[in-house]
């Protein structure tokens, strides 16, 4: 795994809000990631999160045909856990964001099925249970991501003027411009990637993805990294009902069972990881 970042890549990320890293995984590592994610998604079945029940009566919506989404696979699949809690990933995220430590917010398998709908423009962090201008996401291409099958698009620099207002991912992919009309003139940057490449993007950059105009699947594995020290903002997002009820606004989000510390320059994160793996937690 190529985890070395150049100063040019870090500077580009901080200016534009995203960076694409080609040849991130070796061919052998790519197959390892594919096996782990495919197995975890099969194991999860139709259950989006492990604490959510499947509503057999619910009618399918536009969103169901944007992508197949399975969240926090690390919590019930040891192969995914080993990959996602790799301290090297946390270090890369911390170096790009310019912070000392990173916790996992959540992982997500985001799989565009054949003929999938486009993913409308949106911001990530405003959905989440904390607010941070330094949070960011890793997006690993498990298949070639192309203009034809739904690669990512970014509005470069939009993270600099974003507030924490947002829109849902709906049928009108341009809803975001009602909130941020000043972004209408920004030229979108497509992020085509070969399988095994990756990108990092800021949690406040406007981004989306095209439709899948092919009969094939476009698989991606993503991971949201939360800077260590972030606090609860009152939104539930991925938190269980029990966790949500236990937090008050301003509480530190430092529960390793939900948001494990992946990397810290000064804290003994290696000990935390060793203890967690030793007890199976």
Image (cartoon, rainbow, N blue to C red):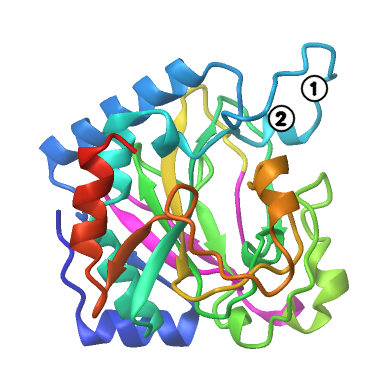
Residue at 35%, 20% (x, y): give it: 39
> As rendered, which of 92 and 271 lies closer to the eye?
271
Please provide percent x and percent y for residue 43. 44, 17
Residue at 76%, 64% (x, y): give it: 234
Q: Give the number of the disc on residue 275.
A: none
Up-down relation of residue 3 to residue 179 (above or below): above
Whether residue 270 sits left or right of residue 80 in the image: it is: left
> As rendered, which of 138 and 27 lies closer to the eye?
138
Q: Which residues are magenta?
A: 184-210
Up-down relation of residue 71 to residue 201 (above or below): above
Crowd rating for badge 1 (residues with CA inside 10 Å; few <14, some 14–19, many 20+): few
Instruction: Verify whether residue 200 appears in magenta.
Output: yes
**Quarter of the rendering containing residue 51:** top right
Whether residue 208 sits left or right of residue 272 in the image: it is: right
> As rendered, which of 60 and 114 lies closer to the eye?
60
**Quarter of the rendering containing residue 63:** top right
Residue at 88%, 71% (x, y): give it: 178
Residue at 26%, 74% (x, y): give it: 267
User: In what element is the residue under mark 1?
Assistant: loop
Residue 237: in sight, yes or no?
Answer: no
* Residue holding disc 2: 64
Whether residue 273 sits left or right of residue 1 in the image: it is: right
* Residue holding disc 1: 60
Crowd rating for badge 2 (residues with CA inside 10 Å; few <14, some 14–19, many 20+): few
**What is the spatial separation of the Cα atoms under label 1 and label 2, in whole angstroms?**
6 Å
> As rendered, which of 129 and 42 lies closer to the eye?
129
The reply to whether the C-beta atoms of the residues labelled 1 and 2 are less than 8 Å apart is yes
Please provide percent x and percent y for residue 132. 59, 77
Up-down relation of residue 191 to residue 113 (above or below): below
């Amino acid at each position: 795994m190529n985890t070395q970042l150049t100063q040019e890549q870090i500077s580009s990320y901080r200016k534009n809000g995203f960076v694409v890293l080609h040849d991130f995984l070796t061919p052998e590592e790519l197959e390892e990631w594919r096996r782990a994610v495919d197995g975890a998604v099969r194991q999860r079945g139709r259950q989006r999160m492990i604490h959510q029940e499947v509503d057999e009566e619910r009618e399918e919506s536009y969103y169901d045909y944007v992508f197949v989404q399975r969240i926090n696979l690390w919590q019930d699949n040891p192969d995914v856990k080993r990959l996602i809690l790799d301290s090297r990933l946390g270090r890369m995220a911390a170096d790009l964001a310019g912070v000392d430590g990173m916790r996992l917010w959540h992982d997500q398998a985001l799989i565009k099925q054949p003929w999938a709908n486009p993913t409308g423009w949106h911001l990530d962090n405003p959905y989440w249970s904390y607010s941070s201008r330094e949070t960011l996401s890793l997006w690993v291409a498990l298949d070639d991501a192309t203009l034809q099958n739904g690669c990512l698009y970014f509005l470069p620099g939009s993270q600099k003027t974003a507030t924490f207002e947002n829109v849902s991912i709906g049928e009108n992919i341009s809803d975001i411009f009602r909130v941020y009309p000043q972004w209408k003139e920004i030229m979108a940057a497509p992020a085509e990637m070969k399988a095994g490449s990756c990108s990092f993007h800021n949690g406040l950059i406007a981004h989306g993805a095209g439709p899948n105009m092919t009969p094939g699947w476009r698989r991606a594995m993503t991971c949201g990294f939360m800077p260590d020290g972030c606090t609860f903002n009152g939104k539930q997002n991925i938190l269980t009902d029990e966790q949500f009820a236990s937090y008050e606004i301003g509480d530190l989000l430092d529960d390793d069972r939900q948001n494990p510390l992946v990397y810290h320059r000064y804290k003994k994160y290696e000990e935390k990881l060793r203890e967690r793996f030793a007890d199976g937690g």
